[in-house]
Amino acid sequence: MSKVRLKLYVTGKSLRSERAIARLRSFFEHEMDGACEMEIIDVLERPQLAEDEKILATPTLIKVLPPPLRRVVGDLSDTRKVLMGLDLLHLLPSTGGSRERGT
């Protein structure tokens, strides 16, 4: 499997931002044993990057690699929907159950 590279755009240290970061790290960094690299970009600290990527709302998650580029905007709490939106549904553990939804 090729390495997955993600960019997560958030706004400050809000509860919504912190939840998105925690959920995504939990799945992509821990469940995938290092096969994922996630860059977190705070649009308040780096507004030019957000403008360059045409980020209109946060949180926004962008799959950079593997191609094609995909985006998921807004609620990132449902792991299954996030993976579907990123075209990474095959990464979901086949055992199903409680690991399908973010907690």
Image: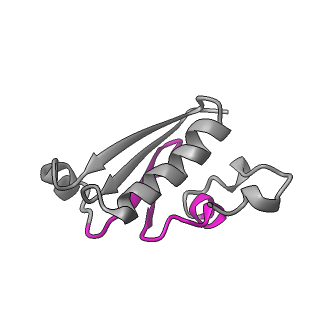
- Give the residue displayed 16% in from the left and 48% down from the top: 46
Left or right placement of residue 31 versus residue 71 in this view? right
Quadrant (top left, top right, bottom left, bottom right) of the N terminus: top right
- Residue 75: x and y in percent read 47, 70
* Viewer-nearest residue: 61 or 19: 19
* Viewer-nearest residue: 68 or 63: 63
Q: How are the colours assigned in the image? A: one colour
Q: Is residue 70 magenta?
A: yes
Q: Is residue 47 magenta?
A: no
Query: Magenta stretch?
Result: 56-84
**Camera sees residue 17:** yes
- Give the residue displayed 35% in from the left and 44% down from the top: 40
Q: How many marks?
A: 0
- Give the residue displayed 45% in from the left and 45% down from the top: 6
Quadrant of res 4: top right
- Residue 61: x and y in percent read 42, 56
Q: Is residue 95 above or below residue 34?
A: below
Left or right placement of residue 93 versus residue 103 in this view? right
* Viewer-nearest residue: 18 or 62: 18
Quadrant of res 57: bottom left
- Give the residue displayed 68% in from the left and 56% down from the top: 89
Left or right placement of residue 71 versus residue 54 in this view? right
**Camera sees residue 59:** no
Residue extending furthest toward the right: 95
Left or right placement of residue 7 versus residue 4 in this view? left
Residue extending furthest toward the top: 34
- Residue 100: x and y in percent read 72, 60
- Residue 80: x and y in percent read 66, 63
Quadrant (top left, top right, bottom left, bottom right) of the C terminus: bottom right
